[in-house]
Image (cartoon, grey):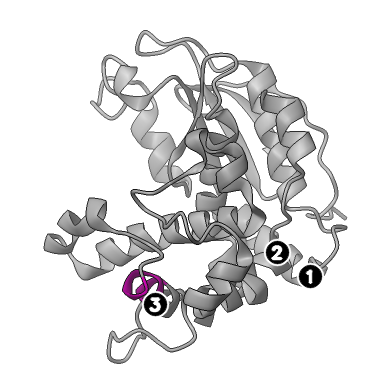
Amino acid sequence: MFDELQSTTLIVSETDAYGPFESVVSARGLKILGLGAVGGQEKVSDEFLEKVALTSNSMLDPTAKGIKKNKLKKGIKKMIKTGVIQRVGFGEYDEYDPILDSGKTKGWDQVNDAYQHTDFIWEMEQDDPNQITEVVEHLLHTYTKFLLPTVFKNDYLIFSSKNKKGRTDTLRLAVDEAIDNGVFFTDDYTHLKSRSEEEYYDVISTEYLFILTYAMWGYVERFVEGGSLDTEWSDNHLEPKAIKKDNPTGFKLYKRTVKKLIRKPSAQLLESLFI
């Protein structure tokens, strides 16, 4: 019987089953799809897809210290059942011409409608110092959307179902506390409030959880160019002690949920893959 937690053989295959995504590699819980040579851009390299898959498997490692194997298995089974994919492209979204969602890229709509996904990982030019953060950030976004809420449903409610007020044990409270205490800044996202409060909180919560996790790992200073995300996160809260002091709800949320499913990938591994 297939065990969702076993390491998969990371073989990148050519495929015609995913529209413009011409390469695929299977990691734990998700298929990683690479765009072909469309829109004037290069095809995502097989080597890069394999590196993304290695990173993902490292982060979802059931043998790592502190990981709750049965909870991780539950989340991974759900990701497989719902068809979660991680999309990978080359360069930047705006560099594709015609733009990918223009209706002119054959198979684009069909794939995006058929599978669960959020955000892209972009293969950058060789030796780009931002490549590690690009990969880890968007893998974390995928786990925030499709892994963590499956296992820790109450913790990841933005609104309660009854009165649409944030519950006291959720990601919503951690986000609000971080904003109120000058840890997390959301000026770049306030325009979303005019669309809906739900959309605003969905976006900022995903971004918040990435930066919270990266800061708890000490990787903002290590892997973000310039060692700062100061337009979104206070430079005074780049390590656990400061986060625990001024964003204790976020600190507890990380310890209670993220740390039990997602392993901190070793800096040595990330540097060997992407630098």
Secondary element type, mark 2: helix
In the figure, residue 73 lies in which quadrant? bottom right
Tell me the tag on residue 57. Answer: none
Asked if the residues shown at circle 3 and circle 2 are in contact, with their CB atoms under 8 angstroms apart, the answer is no
From where the camera sits, is residue 37 visible?
yes
Dot placed on the residue nearer the N-terminal end, 1 or 2: 1
Q: Nearer the viewer, residue 218 or 26?
A: 218
Q: Which residue type carries mark 2?
A: Leu
Q: CA distance from mark 1 to mark 2?
A: 6 Å
Magenta extent: 175-181
In the figure, residue 1 lies in which quadrant? bottom right
Residue lying at 51% horizontally and 54% vertically, measured from the top left: 210
Residue lying at 38% horizontally and 44% vertically, measured from the top left: 113
What x and y, as percent, mark residue 233? Answer: 41, 56
Q: Which residue type carries mark 3?
A: Glu
Task: Tell me: residue 211, above or below residue 103.
Answer: below
What x and y, as percent, mark residue 106? Answer: 36, 21
Q: Main secondary structure of the magenta part?
A: helix
How many neighbours does mark 3 have within 10 angstroms: few (below 14), some (14-19), or many (20 or more)?
Answer: some
Q: Label 1, on which residue?
A: 68
Q: Label 2, on which residue?
A: 261
From where the camera sits, is residue 153 visible?
no
Q: Quadrant of the C terminus?
A: top right
Query: Is 178 part of what is drawn in magenta?
Result: yes
Q: Which residue type carries mark 1?
A: Lys
